[in-house]
Every structure is written in C-alpha cells, then in structure tokens.
Amino acid sequence: MSYMLNPGAESESNIEVHKYYSGTVLGAALLALVLQAFLHKYGRWSELIDLPLLVTIYFGVSRRNPVTGLFLGAAIGIFQDALSHDPIGLYGIAKTIVGYVASSIGARIDTEHPASRFGLIFLFFHFHQVVLTITQHVLLDLQTPFFSPRLLLDSIVTAGAGIVLFALLDRLRRSS
Amino acid sequence: MIDTIRRRPLALLAGVVLAQVLLLAFQIKRENGEDHVRLVRYWAVEMLTPLERAGTLAFSKISGVWYGYVSLHDARAENQKLRGEVEQLRLRNQQLESRVAEEQRLGVLQSFREAHPEAAMLAAEVIGASADPTSHTLFINRGEHDHIRRNLGVITPDGVVGKIVEVFPASAQVLLINDKDSGVGALIASTRTHGVVKGSGDPEPRMEYIVNDEKVQVGEAITTSGEDRIFPKDLPIGTIASADPGNPFQVIRIRPAARLDRLEEVLVLLSQKELTPKKTDGGSVAPSAPSSPSSQPKTGALKSAPTANQTAGIKSPALEPQR
C-alpha cells in the first residue's frame, strides 16, 4: 500500500515492464468478457465482480504503457457495451480512462503486493464508477448514484477477486 | 506518427474519449440509434457468442460429469442415509401398528370383562409356546403371584382357549383345547346334545360321544356344557367343520372359535361362575340361552350364550382335571 501511496518510493527506471506470451492479453480480455456475460446465467453473485475492469487494470499496471492501456480499456469497454443494452461508449469511455490511468500509475509504482493490489483495485473500481456516473449524468441524463452500499460491496468483492486473478495472470508473464 | 502518439498519450486519450462521446451523442440523438451501431454490436456478439456457447457446452459437460459421477458419491451416501431412515421409520411404523393392534385386542378384552362383571377374570399375555411341536400349550405371564391355579379356564372374547395345567410363580402353562390331552365338556348348541371336545393333536379338535343317529350339520355352534367344572356353561368352543359316521360314535371335527394359532392376550377365568347376558350395541338385551334348541344361535356369540340351564350329561374321563 505504501508503494501506491508514495509513488516516489521507487524510481521509474527500477520499475519492471512485464511482457506476456502472445495472445495472452487478447485471450484474457475475451475470457473476461465471456465469463462476465456467461456467469450471469448462473446467479447474481457474478454481478459483484467486474472481470473486464480487473483485466483492464491488470494489464494497464503491468505493461505500463498508457497507449496500449487506453486502447485495451476502450476495446474491452466497447465490447462490454456491445454485449449489453447500453449505448456503445458508456463503458468504453470509463475503461479507456481507467486503462490510461492504470498504465500511468503502473509506470510509477510497484503493484506486486497483494495489499497494494487490493487498494489499487478498490480505488480504480470507484474511479471507474465515478467516470461512468458522470457520463450517464451528462450524456444520458440518468440520475445514477456515485456511491452506494452495494457499490462498496461490489468494490470489496472485486478487489478480493482481483488479488486472486492477478496472481493467476502473473503466471502468464514471459520470463525476461 | 506512432512515435508522436506514444509521446502524447494524453492527447490520444482525449481523442479516443471524444470519439466515444460523439458516438454516444450520435446514438442518443437518434431515437432509433440502435440501428446505427448495430454493426458494432453484431461483431461483438458474433465474436463472443461462440465462446459463450463453448463455455455453456463445457459447463454443461462438467456439470454432467459432476452430477453424474462426483455427485453420485453424495447421492450414494444420501441414499444409504435415507434407506436407513426408511428402515427405522418402517420399524417404528411396525411398532406403532403392533401397539395399536395390541390396544385393540386389549380393548376387546376389556370390553368383554366389563360386559361380565359377575365373572372374575384376569387378563394375561401369551409369552411363549411349547417347544414340542406335538404339544399344543402356551405360557402366559400370570402365575401364583396373580392367584392363578390349575384347572382355571382360559378364554378370549371369541371363545374357549384351554385350561391352566401348570402354575409357576410368575407364569402358567395353558393346555389348548386342540391338544391331544385336552377335553372340554361341550354341547351342540342347536340340539343341546352333550359330548366332549377332545384334542386330536391336529389344529381341529373333535367332538366325541355323539351317536350316529344324532343329526348334526356343518356350521353348527358348539358351546361349553359346564360339566367339566372348568368352564362356565355356553361359552363358544367352535363350529362343526365336518361330521362323519363312525363306530360307535360320529367323527365330528370342530373349527375352534378362538384363533388358537394367533393368541396374544387371553382371559383367565378365576371362577366357574356363569356369564350373564348383557345389552348389545343396539341397546337390546342379548338373547339368553334358549330353552328350546331352535332358538340357539349357531355362531354362539359369547354375549348371547349364557344360560342358567343346568343339564346333566355324560362324564368323560377327559373332563377330569389333569395334572
């Protein structure tokens, strides 16, 4: 957590940029989208976790490239919109910004510790929610809340699941 | 160009976000905006639905394996548990049914006793039978402690069972009327013809000392005559199952009124006092023993059997108290 709260703790040059086997990012993103849509059939508990958001954050902070981060976020968000009944661009905008910010933060801090990952996911979840809600307020004239107990629960569950998912995705890293 | 983009990611972000904002605005402005982004949705769905379909198929396969094999273990354990519960419930049910049947039998005995307060009776439970297959005897749970003594009559509401032949401190042995050593003073209810019902070793005892000239009919009731000084008069013994001419007497087989092979509770007559008629369920007084043969019921129901009629008759050695 201290790494995250104190970005200057390590210099940018010391931050390792992780590389992955080819197809890993695309496969993980598709799998996250498929699972998110697929698991809804088997219970509302799956709504507690935002798998596409987790993949966006993970590859953003791991690859530490804002350009790929924002494009990955945009692609995942647009796919998420396309698979829902929402106007296309709603999640796209939110995840584009999350992907960009995650990449930018990932280039400055180390996010390997589970506690820092939990905090990072928790904050990104609410950041994503804020961007989403602003978009809904401004462009769609929808009065959705910025915060609610349900969102708090969702953020905690997503952060907890994110620790496990990040650990699994770490195994797909290509050794340098 | 790519380098420029890489150097200015913030500008790229702004561009991508702006593009999406415009896309959103475009969709919102059009009432049927869905049509204008249908291609995007179409591609997305076409790309992901095969994966979803594969996931669903895999999930159903895994579920099938789980429920078919892995979960079968639980099903087997549950099956065994349920089977055990069924066995326990079945046993419990049998116990309850047995208890209900026992209550019903005891109720019949109690009703019978209450219907005949003039005759001292003692209810007893059959606790055993003879180990000798040719000996038709029973053991009851009443003995010297209950003032049981030898040569007391044993009956059920259906009819005569036998007599006490041995008494122990807490039990007694009953000689059934179909034992070869048994003999009961009897008479044919319809004709008042006297004879002796003796055991033959078969389930069906025989009525002896009925001459060939005497007309008897199958189904006629046989009752006690009271001559043996064990049973009061006119207790039902049974009905005639068959009657054949013999030398010098007829061979008459009796179908016992009491179910001698299924006795569980019996009544021990503590005296030979006769049983008086009681009111029937309909409130009418049951017919007393007839003075004329034609009025005697053939089935010899106990409530309608008693009479004060004292008839002298033959005395058979079988009627003598036995040791």
Image (spheres, rainbow, N blue to C red):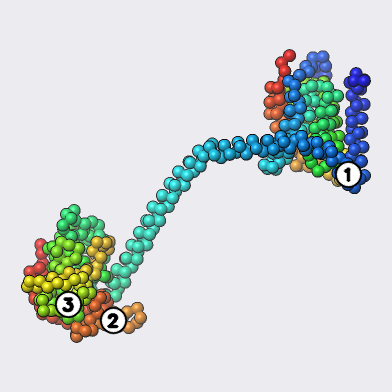
Q: Nearer the viewer, mark 3 or mark 2?
A: 3
Rendered residue at 54%/39% (across/down)? B68
- Disc 2 marks which amino acid? Ala
Residue B96 located left or right of residue B274: right
Residue A171 located left or right of residue B33: left
Q: Which residue is mark 3?
A: B216
The mark that comes first in sequence, 1 or 3, is: 1
Question: What is the C-alpha distance between the residues marked 2 and 1?
Answer: 99 Å
Q: Which residue is mark 2?
A: B286
Quarter where residue A150 is shown:
top right
Q: Quadrant of the N terminus of chain A?
A: top right
Rendered residue at 32%/65% (across/down)? B105
Q: Secondary structure at mark 3?
A: loop
In the image, residue A106 sits, relative to residue B187, either above or below, namely above
Quarter where residue B239 is shown:
bottom left
Q: Secondary structure at mark 2?
A: loop
- Disc 3 marks which amino acid? Val
Q: Residues within 10 Å of mark 2 (few under 14, many from 20)?
A: some
Establish whether labels 1 and 3 are both on one chain.
Answer: yes
Residue B149 in view: no
Chain of the residue that carries numbered disc 1 in the rendered image? B
Chain of the residue that carries numbered disc 3 in the rendered image? B
- Disc 1 marks which amino acid? Gly
Q: Which residue is mark 1?
A: B33
Most foreground residue, B20 or A117: B20
Q: Position of residue B87 (x, y in %)?
A: 41, 49
The mark that comes first in sequence, 3 or 2, is: 3
Q: Nearer the viewer, mark 2 or mark 1?
A: 1
In the image, residue B183 sits, relative to residue A110, either above or below, namely below
